[in-house]
Image (tube, rainbow, N blue to C red):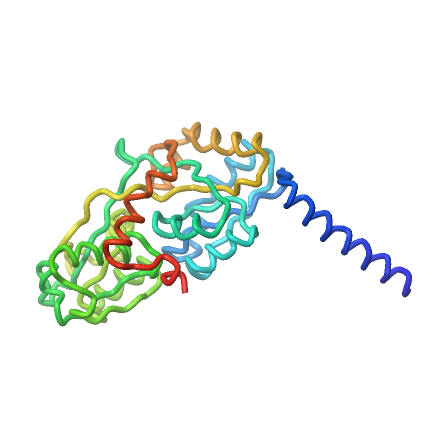
Amino acid sequence: MKSRVLALGVAALFLLCWAAVGAVAGVSRDPQVLRVALLPDENASKVIQDNDGLKVYLEKRLAKKIELYVLTSYAAMIEATRNGRIDLAFFGPLSYCMAKDKAAIEPIAAKIKDGSTTYKSVIIAGMNSGVEKPEDIRGKRMAYGDQASTSSHLIPKGVLAQSGVKPGDYQESFLGKHDAVALNVMRGNVDAGGLSQVIFIGLVEKGTIDKTKVKVIAESAPIPEYPWVMQTDLSPALREEIRKAFLELKDPTILKALKADGFASIRDSDYDVIRNAAKILGLDLGSLEK
């Protein structure tokens, strides 16, 4: 028994040493299972459901098993990517910039919608909140999603700042998800909130949000779309196959669930506008993750 335990211990030590040598030598990976993290910006079950078609497509296209994960927060997703527990990830623009500072990742593609690879953020307010324009949020309750969210924090906060409304001028709260922001505005728990325009429209279309109880008081300039990214230690051949799989995806049923018309190539520099917006607002990308 002791010899068996010793043998297992030696084997484990060998594997750890081999992994360390491989990392130093820059050995690329070609795993049979690809772990994919999805942004937790809505209810987890809905996020998984919306991406199930993509999962099946990637499994057939890449001949690999795909495991989908929705982690508890943007910070948890960034940390899992940094630690190599995730192979592919669907980030928001801001959370991507934060992850890029910590992990060896590269952008793959962004969805195309209505001929564009951009989207918008909106600020909504309750019908009885007394808020008709951004300036009216002074002295009111303003809700955001996750601190690392682009369209549910960074951009709406920027829209307010452009209107002369600073964080100290209102009571802010962070509710984690876009749909939570919209629901709390509708229920009157907060006076206004910021979230993705696409998500807001979807919530209204499904009847989750009663459009007679909320109104859009501002919308942002175009924002670069959410990027799909992958770890750079995946083999070059696999990375190319993953890239092609996204760019050649044409199935209308899968794309409809993803609220996309297709995918386009992207570069890291496409997200410099997000980094610059954070600097203008004086936001430290590192502190947002905590």
Residue 159 visible? The answer is yes
Q: Is residue 189 above or below residue 81?
A: below
In front here: 36 or 261? 36
Residue at x-position 19% and y-position 45% = 221
In front here: 266 or 65? 266
Residue at x-position 54% and y-position 49% = 86
Residue reaching furthest to the front: 24
Task: Say which quarter of the image contains residue 249.
Answer: top left
Give the percent coordinates (x, y) of residue 176. Answer: 35, 63
In front here: 281 or 148? 281
Determine whether, in the image, residue 126 is placed left or right of residue 154: left
Give the percent coordinates (x, y) of residue 40. Answer: 41, 56
Q: Is residue 252 above or below residue 129?
A: above
Task: Say which quarter of the image contains residue 228.
Answer: top left
| Quarter the N terminus occupies | bottom right
Residue at x-position 16% and y-position 61% = 125
Q: Is residue 69 above or below residue 271?
A: below
Determine whether, in the image, residue 277 is placed left or right of residue 5: left
| Quarter the C terminus occupies | bottom left
Give the percent coordinates (x, y) of residue 150. Answer: 30, 52
Determine whether, in the image, residue 53 is placed left or right of residue 35: left
Q: Is residue 51 above or below residue 247?
A: below
Residue 53 visible? The answer is no
